Amino acid sequence: MNIKCVALDVDGTLLDDDHQCSSENIAAIREAHDKGIEIVLCTGRSPDSTYPILKNDIGIQGTLITHNGALTTDEHLKIVDECGFTIETVTQLVAYCREHAVQWDVNTASDIFCEHVSDEGAEMYKKFFLEPKRIDNVFELKDATILKFCCYGTISEMDQLEKQFASLHLDKLGLRMIRSGDFFIDVIHSDVGKGHALKQFVEQKGIKAEEVLAMGNYYNDLDMLQFAGLGIAVDNAPEEVKLSANEVTVSNNDNAVHTVLHQYILGNEVQAGKEK
């Protein structure tokens, strides 16, 4: 298989459960990069939360697809493509989150804005290298392009919020909801997705879908795994995600990226994945 591009989800795939990138994963990515493979990090995170992983931890240049596909930036964080909406579009969502004290924020290409940050929210932002800007009223951002409306809470809180948002028929507003993690719900433009952004990127590079290897672990990775010629789910993924992939490999805590890159690109196979 002639792989020319590797697209990696970050949390739950590239990083372990302690949000660390192992030395094994780093070494394998660097070696693949040195062989001329395009490395793309595809994540629900913002660029500011993702760039340090690529630049400081891994130590390479590459493309970032962030906010679940709403924003693509090059190795210098220059915007290549973005797709968003106006703040008025999420008026109902803002009203619900205000009323029910949900931790939420809105993201532009360069900033993250919050009206209020709980103690739990502050710890979460710190973990993801984020410093949200406080704003009295988010509707002051009427001229901004919003890339993502994000909510954070416990699993049960997000389960309830997911049901509530589903009842609002977001598709009629040109929006769609993604459960991007157990503790996160993202609302993005209906045309946005990791798979769509990855498709645009590789077409610009002259790379075919069958030359793309993608790895992911959650529902926001589904379209990316299905687009890639080889979509691989990690073993810690939900069953639906595993069934959508071509193959299942070891978990994020067992150096999954290292295993897959050696299996398909670098040789010296470490451990074969499990076929779907």
Image (cartoon, rainbow, N blue to C red):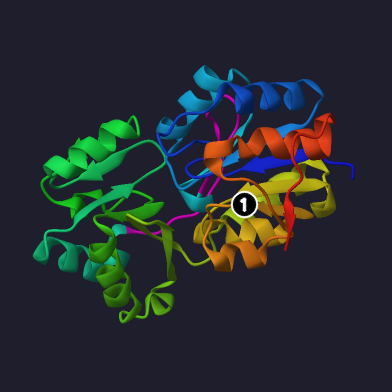
Q: Residue at x 64, y 56 (%)?
A: 224
Residue shown at the point (27%, 76%) measured from the top left = 164
The N terminus, quarter of image: top right
Residue occupying the point 64% across, 29% down? 62
Residue at the image point whose x is 16% and y is 67% from the top? 95
Name the residue nearer the viewer: 55 or 123.
123
Looking at the image, is 209 positioned above or below residue 60? below
Vertical arrangement, residue 209 with respect to residue 92, above or below:
above
Q: Is residue 61 visible?
A: no
Q: Position of residue 92 (x, y in %)?
A: 23, 71
- Asked if residue 115 lies left or right of residue 182, the reply is left
Quarter placement of the C terminus: bottom right
Q: Answer left or right for 85 relative to 196.
A: left
Q: Amino acid at mark 1?
A: Ala
Identity of the residue furthest to the right in this view: 1
- Residue segment shown in magenta: 71-86
Label 1 Cα neighbours within 10 Å, binned few <14 / some 14-19 / many ≥20: many
Left or right side of 215 for 193 = left
Residue 230, given in percent of the width and then of the height, sits at 77, 53
Q: Is residue 43 magenta?
A: no
The answer to whether residue 216 is seen in the rendering is yes
Which residue in the protein does label 1 denote?
A: 197
From the viewer's side, name the closer residue of 182 and 172: 182
Nearer the observer, 135 or 7: 7
Residue 272 rendering spot, x and y as whole percentages? 77, 45
Q: Position of residue 214 (x, y in %)?
A: 68, 48
Question: Left of 68 or right of it: where is 275?
Answer: right
Along the viewing direction, whichever of 254 and 144 lies nearer the viewer: 254
SS type, badge 1: helix
